Amino acid sequence: MLQADMERKPIVKQCRGCAKIDGDFCSVWVSPPTKWRLGTCPTATHVKVEFHEQVQKVRVGQQKQKKK
């Protein structure tokens, strides 16, 4: 919920297509540009977030050391 005494800023171009747009303003955030500054807006409904899993080698058992 937005507070009534806060001045709302208009949406930015990255917000286009989101279900949370109310006219030219965001219904969730007071300042949408600050949510897009560091990456994707956390409440954007039109952006699909993909998670990439890093592949690690799994070591099974131990190998014996060669004697010198």
Image (cartoon, rainbow, N blue to C red):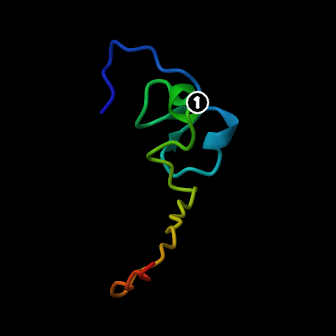
> From what the image shows, is residue 64 above or below residue 7?
below
Q: Is residue 43 above or below residue 25?
A: below
- In the image, what residue occupies the spot 56% across and 50% down? 18
Looking at this view, is 17 or 63 the one in front? Answer: 63
Q: Is residue 27 above or below residue 43?
A: above
Secondary structure under tag 1 reads loop
Work out which quarter of the rendered image holds the C terminus and state it. Answer: bottom left
Residue 42 pos. (x, y %)? 45, 45
Q: Which residue is label 1 attached to?
A: 37
Pick out the residue farthest to the right.
Answer: 13
Q: Residues within 10 Å of mark 1 (few under 14, many from 20)?
A: few
Residue 8 horizontal/vertical position (percent): 48, 20
For image coordinates 49% across by 35% down, the residue present is: 26
Residue 56 percent location from the top left of the image? 48, 72
Q: Quadrant of residue 1?
A: top left
How many tags in the picture? 1
Q: Is residue 59 above or below residue 50?
A: below
- Quarter-of-image position of residue 58: bottom left
x 44%, y 25%: residue: 30
- Amino acid at circle 1: Arg
- Residue 20 point in image, percent of width and height: 48, 46
Which residue is at the front of the view, 67 or 2?
A: 67
Q: As rendered, which of 7 and 57 lies closer to the eye?
A: 57
Q: Would residue 61 appear left or right of 10 to someone viewing this image?
A: left
Residue at the image point whose x is 58% and y is 30% from the top: 37
Q: Is residue 19 left or right of residue 65?
A: right
